[in-house]
Image: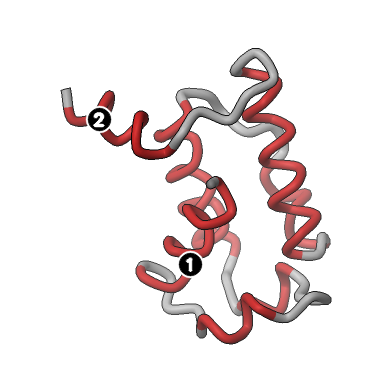
């Protein structure tokens, strides 16, 4: 699932406290990411799904759940309404 990919990246790479990600009203600005860290997280999504996310700075003022939904919508828009399984993408990247 895309939300797990984002959460794992934030915890493992950006050093975000995993307990923050469980907060239902979490704002992206509360993650403690600077603009470069936010863009790097989005690069991870872009690399996995093979396209550029439009207007990445718009996410800075969103809730975390709204950001995930917006990214999912863009992925679905590029993949015939589907979100490809991350495992399948990992296999494709490895080849």
Q: Is residue 63 left or right of residue 29?
A: right
**Which of marks 1 and 2 precedes in the sequence?**
1
In front: 54, or 82? 82
Residue 64, horizontal then vertical, whole percent: 73, 64
Residue 62: image quadrant is: bottom right
Q: Residue furthest top?
A: 80
Circle 1 SS class: helix
**Whole-percent x and y of residue 17?**
51, 85
Q: Which residue is mark 1?
A: 10
Q: Residue at x 48, y 67 (%)?
A: 10
The secondary element bearing badge 2 is classed as helix
Q: How is the image coloured?
A: secondary structure
For the point 68% across and 38% down, which residue is it?
A: 72
**Which quadrant is the C terminus positioned in?**
top left
> Residue 84: x and y, percent?
50, 28
Quadrant assignment, res 19: bottom right
Q: Is residue 4 above or below residue 28?
A: above
The image's mark for residue 91 is 2
Residue at 75% across, 46% down: 69
- At a point 73% along the width and 53% down the height, the residue shown is 67
38 to the left or right of 5: right
Residue 20, above or below 6: below
CA gap between label 2 and label 1 equals 22 Å
């Amino acid at each position: 699932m895309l939300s797990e990919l984002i959460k794992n990246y934030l915890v493992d790479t950006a050093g975000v406290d995993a307990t923050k990600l469980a907060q239902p009203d979490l704002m992206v600005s509360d993650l403690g990411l600077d603009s470069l860290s936010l863009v790097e997280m989005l690069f991870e999504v872009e690399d996995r799904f093979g396209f550029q996310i439009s207007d990445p700075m718009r996410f800075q003022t969103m809730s975390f759940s709204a950001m995930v939904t917006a990214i999912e919508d863009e992925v679905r828009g590029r993949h015939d309404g589907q979100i490809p399984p991350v495992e399948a993408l990992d296999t494709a990247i490895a080849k």
